[in-house]
Image (tube, rainbow, N blue to C red):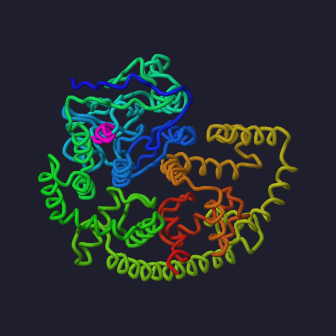
């Protein structure tokens, strides 16, 4: 074990921070391809407390692997050894015999071989922290949540060997968040003392019971066994980040360093890799999240499914981009270029115009058939005709009118029905199950409500037979996570199309569901009455593309 000799002279009490104090908070709660970490975003609540203590704070929420790597690079540039370093990361971790990784929100079933491409090695975080020996702490928070892993990896954290003077704290994400805001920043208190009051957290590495982490002047190493320890820590972090920019940052700091030749070879290797070059070209576009969503919408319109429209280019988006590039004779890198985006936009706009024209033709034809059938049935005004119309067109143009005109027939039947018949019917309606209506039919084979009972039994059987599909459609709509504003936008779009969804209040009632079904039927989408990605894309396409 390498050893520090730390200054025994601590400054006066009082919560204070050095000029170079810096903190990094990464809260990856929502993963594209795994269960969410419920308490991960609690970390961000510590930002105000850290800033009040004088730290410069870098934060990232639900960041992709690329964004995660960029934040670690930025921290490496700021951690110059002049002050304290706090690195707190919550999310999905996995480990193997050779190390551990924290994964970006876009990670998809990483294996031992792909872990470095889908996450950042914990050794990189510890390496950055090692630039400020004696005054650095790395906190790792997670939860036992499902996350698919490839071969060679298992879920959980294998705490890396600490650099000189680095404390590592592991535990539940919520406990880590509370520890930062409370015990860690307590004035005049060592990390050892802080951990003694946090029974569910585990500390390792540099644990000095008599040296406060906050309060007065930070502890400064005055004698090191290894005079190159700062450079070695910087190199460890650079290897964990494994990017051309990271290696160049090392060379800028240590142009003639111990690992300069290795850094130059790494840069040359990365720059020669076509995929890396393509990735660098996409990065240079500096696409906003909305621009990425637009690419995903356009791909969806052209039937290249990106597995979500969230502005994050994960595995599904990369596969869809690659298929588009292959179909158009472009280099199949999986990364976008400005020229590819322009071509994609033109094709998507043309396809949307074709789909809308087709949908309009189908809508007109469906409405023509609807109106013709109404003239043959419901328009005649008799009960049989009205019921025949509603049975064929429950969401039809005249469905509401038919329901109103049927009511007098039902009221008259109720008045004429025997008291026991009415009571049996009311009881069946209150229970509203197939068995209840079958019971009514058995008790009243010639009853006044036989037709309604049989119709309701048919409806319930249909709902039961299609329950799995309808439940799945409802869950898919819920996964869209639409805000009230987005739901109102959907209702407004349906209203402008003449589909009568009811008031634009963000509440999807029976009228809204009927309007959605009409829209889906006209566009040959799956008719469920619930929104899914394909329906939303089609609803928004006009306003997006024109």
How far across and down, in percent of the image, does residue 137 sit?
39, 32
Going 81% across and 59% down the picture, which residue do you hit? 407
Query: Is residue 383 shown above or below 69?
Result: below
Taking the magenta stretch, the answer to whether it contains residue 129 is yes
The percent position of residue 116, horizontal first and vertical second, equals 24, 46
> How many discs mark residues in the rendered view?
0
Most foreground residue, 453 or 316: 316
Residue 197 higher or lower than 86, as above or below: above
Q: Kindly report the secondary structure that dominates the magenta region of the rendered protein.
A: helix
Q: Residue at x 59, y 64 (%)?
A: 516
Foreground residue among 176 and 133: 133
* Residue 219 placement: quadrant: top left
Q: Which residues are magenta?
A: 124-131
**In the visual, does 203 lie left or right of 418?**
left
Identity of the residue furthest to the front in this view: 9
> In the displayed structure, would residue 129 be above or below residue 300?
above
Position of residue 359 measured from the top left corner of the image (x, y, whole percent): 51, 77
Query: The N terminus appears in which quarter of the rendering?
Result: top left
Can residue 148 be spotted in the picture?
A: no
Q: Residue furthest right?
A: 415
What residue lies at 12% left-to-right and 53% top-to-bottom? 261
Q: Is residue 186 visible?
A: yes
Provide residue 499's location: percent of width, then percent of height: 65, 71
Horizontal side, residue 483 vs residue 264: left or right: right
Any magenta on residue 265?
Answer: no
């Amino acid at each position: 074990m390498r050893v520090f000799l730390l200054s025994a002279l601590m400054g006066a009490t009082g919560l204070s921070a050095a000029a170079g104090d810096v903190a990094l908070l990464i809260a990856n709660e929502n993963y594209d391809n795994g269960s969410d970490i419920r308490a991960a975003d609690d970390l961000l609540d510590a930002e105000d407390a850290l800033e009040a203590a004088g730290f410069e704070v870098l934060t990232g929420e639900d960041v992709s692997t690329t964004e995660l790597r960029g934040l670690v690079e930025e921290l490496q540039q700021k951690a110059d050894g002049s002050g304290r370093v706090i690195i707190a990361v919550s999310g999905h971790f996995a480990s193997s015999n050779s190390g551990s990784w924290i994964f970006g929100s876009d990670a998809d079933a990483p294996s031992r071989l792909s872990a470095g491409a889908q996450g950042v090695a914990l050794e990189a975080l510890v390496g950055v922290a090692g630039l400020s020996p004696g005054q650095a702490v790395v906190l790792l928070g997670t939860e036992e949540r499902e996350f698919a892993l490839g071969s060679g990896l298992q879920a959980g954290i294998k705490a890396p060997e600490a650099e000189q003077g680095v404390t590592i704290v592991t535990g539940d994400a919520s406990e880590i968040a509370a520890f930062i805001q409370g015990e860690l920043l307590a004035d005049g208190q060592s990390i050892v003392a802080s951990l003694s009051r946090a029974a569910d957290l585990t500390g390792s590495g540099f644990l000095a019971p008599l040296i406060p982490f906050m309060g007065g002047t930070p502890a400064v190493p005055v004698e090191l066994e290894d005079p190159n320890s700062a450079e070695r820590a910087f190199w460890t972090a650079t290897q964990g980040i494994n990017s051309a920019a990271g290696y160049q940052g090392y060379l800028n700091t240590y142009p003639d360093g111990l690992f300069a030749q290795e850094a130059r070879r790494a840069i040359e290797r990365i720059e020669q890799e076509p995929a890396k070059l393509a990735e660098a070209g996409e990065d240079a576009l500096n696409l906003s999240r909305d621009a990425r969503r637009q690419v995903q919408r356009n791909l969806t319109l052209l039937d290249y499914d990106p597995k979500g429209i969230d502005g994050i280019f994960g595995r599904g988006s990369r596969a869809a981009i690659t298929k588009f590039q292959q179909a158009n004779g472009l280099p199949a890198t999986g990364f976008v270029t400005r020229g590819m985006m322009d071509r994609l936009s033109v094709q998507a706009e043309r396809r949307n115009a074709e789909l809308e024209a087709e949908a309009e033709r189908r809508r007109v034809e469906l409405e023509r058939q609807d109106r013709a059938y109404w003239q043959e049935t419901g328009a005649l005004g008799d009960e049989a005709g009205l019921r025949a119309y509603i049975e064929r067109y429950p969401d039809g143009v005249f469905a509401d009118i038919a329901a109103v005109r049927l009511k007098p027939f039902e009221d008259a039947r109720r008045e004429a029905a025997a008291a026991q018949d009415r009571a049996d019917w009311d009881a069946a309606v209150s229970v509203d199950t197939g068995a209840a209506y079958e019971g009514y039919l058995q008790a009243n084979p010639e009853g006044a409500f036989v037709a309604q009972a049989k119709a309701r039994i048919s409806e319930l059987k249909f709902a039961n037979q299609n329950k799995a599909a309808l439940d799945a459609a409802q869950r898919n709509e819920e996964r869209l996570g639409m805000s009230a504003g987005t739901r109102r936008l959907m209702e407004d779009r349906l209203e402008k199309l003449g589909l009568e969804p009811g008031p634009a209040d963000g509440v999807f009632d029976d009228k809204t569901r009927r309007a959605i079904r009409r829209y889906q039927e006209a566009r040959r989408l799956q008719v469920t009455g619930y929104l899914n990605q394909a329906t939303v894309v089609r609803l928004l396409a006009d306003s997006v593309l024109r």
